[in-house]
Amino acid sequence: MVLFHRRMVPCGNRYRIVTALGVHFAGDAVSLIWDGLPSHRSKAMKAWIATQRTWLPVKQLPPYGYELNPIEMVWGNIKSTELANLCPDTIDEARAATETGLERVGTNYDLCFNFLDYTGLLL
């Protein structure tokens, strides 16, 4: 599972990253799960996705579908681990703790797929 956070991956880079994933996983099933972020519904994004339909099915999450959005479970996990009882003196300390949590979750295959399984969504 690859997680993008809008502040970490600028919109233009998302196209390149998703395209690179398609090349890397050529022949394997790849699905893109979008939340309701306005840039995911933009005309430019819709036009780009339309050109990728042969290999990239896109699932749009319903609005406020907390239990259907695996990233919400990621944030909940980080909040209860790296950010639990954290009282940072600076925003940089909070950012570092958050990045540590994202790295931990992103490198744990089982944890990522458990978050997906919890949603009950079929990919």
Image: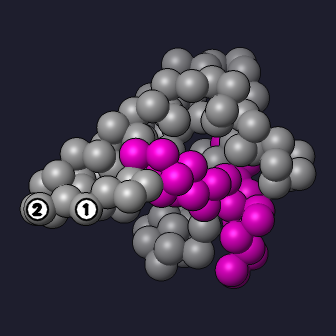
Q: Quadrant of the C terminus?
A: top right
Q: How many marks?
A: 2
Who's the residue at 70% across and 70% down the image? Answer: 66
- Which disc, if any, is residue 97? none
Quick one: 88 or 63, which is closer to the camera? 88
| Residue 73 horizontal/vertical position (percent) | 63, 54
Amino acid identity at mark 2: Thr
| Residue 51 horizontal/vertical position (percent) | 58, 51
Q: Is residue 75 magenta?
A: yes
> Splitting the image into 4 quarters, where does residue 30 fall?
top right
Mark 2 secondary-structure assignment: loop
| Residue 119 horizontal/vertical position (percent) | 81, 54
Amino acid identity at mark 1: Cys
| Residue 16 horizontal/vertical position (percent) | 37, 40
Residue 30 shows in this picture: no
CA neighbours of label 2 inside 10 A, class few (<14), some (14 to 19), many (20+): few
Mark 1 secondary-structure assignment: loop
Q: Is residue 79 magenta?
A: yes
- Which disc, if any, is residue 90? 2
Who's the residue at 47% across and 78% down the image? Answer: 38
Residue 116 shows in this picture: yes
Quick one: 115 or 37, which is closer to the camera? 115
- Give the magenta-colored segment's residue range: 54-82
Q: What whole-number distance in Å separates the C-alpha atoms at marks 2 and 1?
A: 9 Å
In the image, taking residue 22 as reference, residue 114 lies left or right, namely right
